[in-house]
Amino acid sequence: MANEVCFRNMDLDQPWLLEQYKSRGGYEVLTKILTEKMTQDEVIELVKESGLRGRGGAGFPAGLKWSFINRNSEASRYVVCNSDEGEPGTFKDRDILRYNPHQLIEGMIICGFAIDAAAGYNYIRGEFWEPYLRFEAALEEARAAGLLGEDILGSGFNYDVHVHLGAGAYVCGEESALLESIEGKKGQPRFKPPFPAHYGLYGGPTVINNTETLSSVPVLLKNGGDWFKGLGVENSAGTKLFAVSGAVKNPGVFEVPMGIPFSELLELAGGMKDGKKLKAVIPGGCSAPVIPADEIMELNMDYDSIAKAGSMLGSGAVVVIDDSVCMVKLLERMSYFYHEESCGQCTPCREGTGWLYRIVSRIERGEGRQEDLDLLTSVGKNIAGRTVCALGDAAVMPVNGMLKHFRDEFQYHIDNKKCLADS
Amino acid sequence: MGFKSEPMTTMTPLEDKNSLFTPEIRSQIDKWIGKYPAGWKQSAVMAALSIMQDENGGWLSREIMDDVAAYLDMPPIAVYEVATFYSMYELEPVGRHKVCVCTNISCMINGSDKIVDHLEGKLGVKLGQTTEDNRFTLKEVECLGACGGAPMMQIGKQYYENLAPEKVDEILDGLE
Ligand SMILES: Cc1cc2nc3c(=O)[nH]c(=O)nc-3n(C[C@H](O)[C@H](O)[C@H](O)COP(=O)(O)O)c2cc1C
Ligand code: FES
């Protein structure tokens, strides 16, 4: 049951070409929607029924998000695809852009139709040059085939999709910062409400979804919501792209059913590298709290199971940590990241991420004090929930996860001024 | 509702913009402007800065930013804000090749420390510095979304994955 949705054409020679995408029924659903005159509400209802949840991190139901859009708004409506892919450990959307760009385009057109959008924008991180060229070439093909532009397939629907290239900023993956960035501003998140569905890009109602979310739409419409649900487990419909990296033999992106046992996913990735021992796993990107080996080996990879273990499925980025890794050093690197990437707009995040980094850093250097462990928790409490966007929370969660499960390593650093892992 | 999405338009738009850039550059920037709704040409500011950075050997001078501002009818400060916010824009001269090495978690677990040591030793510079002959600038970057190929680096627009010291040598020696 692998490779059923976003990677379904992976076995083809050049799956990114229009002709090859069409050979597998590509754009058939769009054609059906536009020529057999399905209504916009019908499309949204089908996406809702499928149980598809956002793949960018928060897991918000996609159909529900689409249904918030007021199609009679005075301002033009927009579809925005989030291909910023900045959460450390995540590298799945890059493969969709490189290998299945037409499925994303088809998904973006269907979403555009459902909310009667004026245009769609795909925000691709600036470093993804090669994937950008692939996607751009696919757009050209689609335009030439009359699938984008004026009067698509003779339906009277006018709609085009464009790329907006980022230029290096993790926070621009946050949806409202991303909108600011498309508007030609620095990427500082907006205060919410209003949410993008009411007041989004250029002030118009906007659907913003992750690359994998939008790419799933054509297939689930083609095969039906029940089929899609049946691929996964309760509350976690469909398959998921898991980007497995770290201390594994064959890292990579694997499309597997939601709810797959972690142990099976680890096996797909070739198991542990160089006979190393599994120590812990970050199950959903850098921001997701770490889960120790014995626990994760018993867990299934779906929203509810991972949440029950005190973490989150997030973007599906699975970072495998072996027992040679010092957790203090790893957390220091993560805390540096959030401090570096904080946009500086809110004081708790701008200052707090600096505090977190400096405290973890001095523990790592052997200059930690006993009070530092409690101080980390207290700084975290002063960040989480007190900021404009969730970057602050994202900085705190890994700290709390590490202190919960690997406190002994931090204590050892403070007591002995060196690593437990190395000794 | 307090918040409004509005372009930051300059009070004193420049009439003749043709003298700012060559026709080729103008047509590249105009192509980006064409993607956005009327009245929102400032959406093309990131693209314009990237185009001009490539044109200028990898960095943005104050003059270039001012020209971009004039071209897009933006106040210069709005362009500086963008140029200073995003990490891919360089505000100082850089070497011919910008070597961006990822040291984030997946790369770290796979030995990015060793790659950084090797690069620093080979080039004789530290992270953030440029070689004396101006061939290379070495830069530490955050996760580039290629963690399956860790450790990895980017030089120019190209990704290089699954690095080992010998492979790094081969790649660098193959550049001018
Ligand atoms: C700091 C931060 C960074 C984020 N980065 C990304 C990202 O790179 N890609 C992404 O799809 N969502 C990212 N998100 C989540 C988006 O804000 C948003 O929830 C998502 O794009 C919605 O799409 P979905 O419902 O299809 O998941 C980020 C959120 C935060 C707070
Ligand atoms: S951690 Fe290095 S590319 Fe993601």
Image (tube, helix red, strand yellow):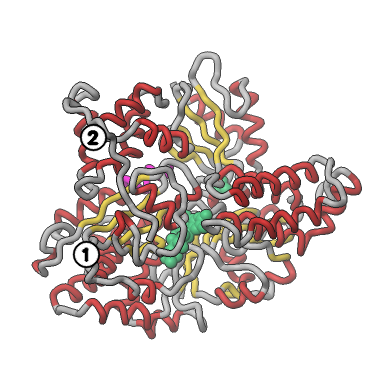
Closer to us: A67 or B31? A67
Q: Are marks 2 and 1 in contact (CB under 8 Å)?
A: no
Q: In this view, does A387 lie above or below A353?
A: below
Residue B16 percent across, percent down from the top left: 17, 25
Residue carrying label 2: B28
Q: In which quarter of the image is the C terminus of chain B?
A: top left
Badge 2 marks a residue whose secondary structure is helix
* Residue A109 image offset from top left, x and y in percent: 25, 64
Per the image, the residue denoted by label 1 is A74
Which percent across, then down, holds residue A178? 41, 52
Which amino acid, mark 1? Glu
Q: Residue A56 carries which label?
A: none
**Residue A128 falls within the magenta-colored stretch:** yes
Magenta residues span A127-134
Residue at image position (85%, 52%) is: A371
Kind of residue at badge 2: Gln
Q: Which residue is drawn at 56% across and 50% down?
A: A346
User: Label 1: few (<14), some or many (≥20) within 10 Å?
Assistant: few
Q: Magenta-highlighted stretch: main secondary structure?
A: helix
Say if labels 2 and 1 share a chain: no
Look at the numbered disc 1 and give the secondary structure of its residue: loop
Chain holding disc 2 = B
Q: Which residue is drawn at 58% across and 28% down?
A: B128
